[in-house]
Amino acid sequence: MMNLSRRKFVQTAATSAIAANALLSKAGASDSTASKTVKVAAIGCGGRSNRDIPNFIKACDMLGLKAEFVALADAFEDKAFEQADKYEIDRSRCIVGWDSYQKVAESDAEFVMLITPPVFRPKHLETLVEAGKHVLMQKPVAVDAPGCRKVIEAGERAKKKGLAILAGTQRRHTVGYMENAAKIENGAIGEILGGTVSWNGTVPWIWERQKGWSDADYLARNWLNWYQMSGDHLGEQHVHNIDVANWYLGRTPQSAIGFGGRARRETGNNYDFFSLDLDYGNGVHIHSQCRQISGTYPRVGEFFRGTKGEVQGGGKLKGVDVSIPKFDVMDKDGNVQELLDWIQSARSGNPINEARQIAESTATAIMGRYAAYTGKFVRFSDLMANPKSEFYDLKVSIQPEHFEKGIVALPPENEVPVPGDGKEIRRRV
Ligand SMILES: NC(=O)c1ccc[n+]([C@@H]2O[C@H](COP(=O)([O-])OP(=O)(O)OC[C@H]3O[C@@H](n4cnc5c(N)ncnc54)[C@H](O)[C@@H]3O)[C@@H](O)[C@H]2O)c1
């Protein structure tokens, strides 16, 4: 179940605006007790860092602070150098290698952005929390159930240490979504009866294998297309919409059944499409649908119908009038606002902690993936609370330590799980 009730969320969001103003006046004053330099590191210098790095700099600027990148870490030198050059950070600050997260943990960075493939997230988060860093961990935060539970444990340790943990689910920091969540909490659409969440689009990118790449290199560069690295696109991309369902309903689903398949993908071993029935109990079902096939009808969003109205994600809400707190966001772009919230919350001593909510949304996606891959009825408790379940301790075959020890084994390419008989039959496609 979600830890943060919607009511508590509304309060937190409202008070964070107050904390923001307090911090602003502190940072803006010539008070030498508030350090204006924010030491930060990024681990993972790929596509998403093109947003998180400049947005972090922008957020600091907006707060009257100065971002100082003490480290840019990546498994590969070319990636780290590319970002260093782009943001005029001295190349000497680049850290390269599979163990670069450990070196960042030893650095004097106060804030660390984890922007690597999801399979690495639980281990890297655990290490950084141990080292006392405030962490942005991009969604999704794991690819199997043990990983989700590890993230929740690390999140609890972070709370005890006063560390701020942000999840990269920017809808939670986007004003339209925040207002709708508050309205739903206050009864604007009554009880949610059902809905649909979708991410139907195209494969974001493919890295074809190049001469000289090891299996580890290929997996890390083309990670998006391997379920052991990404959690499949159901977890990697569609988790955003699933997270909104869990947020608006104020709970996780109890179980999933579903199906999926692979029609046109060219590399790796992800499916192309999934269709799931997420059962939230009390007769409430959410249809979760995602597809990555070019040339097909695109739809990304969320819709929920309640006893008194209906809502489109962070958009139009038809229902009864209710009053909600004013959300005094500084930036309408949730991708920036989330970083403002992260920095402000850490520095004001009231740290945000999104570890449990994103671990549970990630686990929801993993539950759906197992349901589709095996054809079984899968309970949320099978992943999170029932050690006797076959899914509870099931780990993907590729683990972060394999990269560090140089023992990565490439799974068979273009072979996917086939549901139906309880055994792992694989089919070449
Ligand atoms: N919030 C959002 O809307 C959003 C958008 C895009 C991506 N993301 C998430 O951000 C994460 C990264 O995605 P991306 O699109 O930037 O991928 P990417 O492949 O472009 O970048 C990942 C980088 O991590 C590096 N890397 C891989 N393994 C590493 C390791 N063990 N240690 C250090 N570096 C390592 C890669 O070399 C690469 O440069 C993913 O979890 C993705 O789901 C979130």
Image (tube, rainbow, N blue to C red):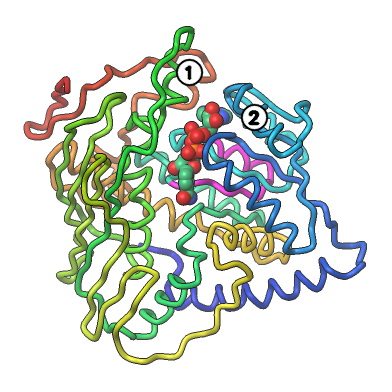
Disc 2, SS:
helix
The residue lying at 34 percent from left, 76 percent from top is 316
Quadrant of residue 193 within the rendered picture: bottom left
> From this viewpoint, is residue 359 visible?
yes
Q: Quadrant of the C terminus?
A: top left
Describe residue 153's horizontal placement relative to residue 209 as left or right: right
| Residue that carries the numbered disc 1 in the rendered image | 217
Q: Nearer the viewer, residue 158 or 168?
A: 168
Quadrant of residue 243 within the rendered picture: bottom left
The answer to whether the residue labelled 2 contacts the one labelled 1, judged by CB atoms less than 8 Å apart, is no
The residue lying at 40 percent from left, 82 percent from top is 183
The residues bearing labels 2 and 1 have C-alpha atoms spaced at a distance of 17 Å
> From this viewpoint, is residue 151 visible?
no
| Residue that carries the numbered disc 2 in the rendered image | 82
Q: Which residues are magenta?
A: 124-139
Specify the farthest residue to the top.
212
Q: Quadrant of the N terminus?
A: bottom left
Task: Answer above or below: position of 243 versus 350.
Answer: above
The residue lying at 48 percent from left, 27 percent from top is 400
Crowding at dot 2, Cα within 10 Å, few <14 / some 14-19 / many 20+, comes out as some
Specify the farthest residue to the front.
295
Residue 296, magenta (yes or no): no
Disc 1, SS:
helix
Q: Where residue 319 appears, x then y in whole percent?
A: 29, 86
Q: Amino acid at mark 1?
A: Asp
The residue lying at 14 percent from left, 22 percent from top is 427
Q: Where residue 255 appears, x then y in whole percent?
A: 20, 55
Q: Where residue 169 appears, x then y in whole percent?
A: 47, 56
Quadrant of residue 331 within the rendered picture: bottom right
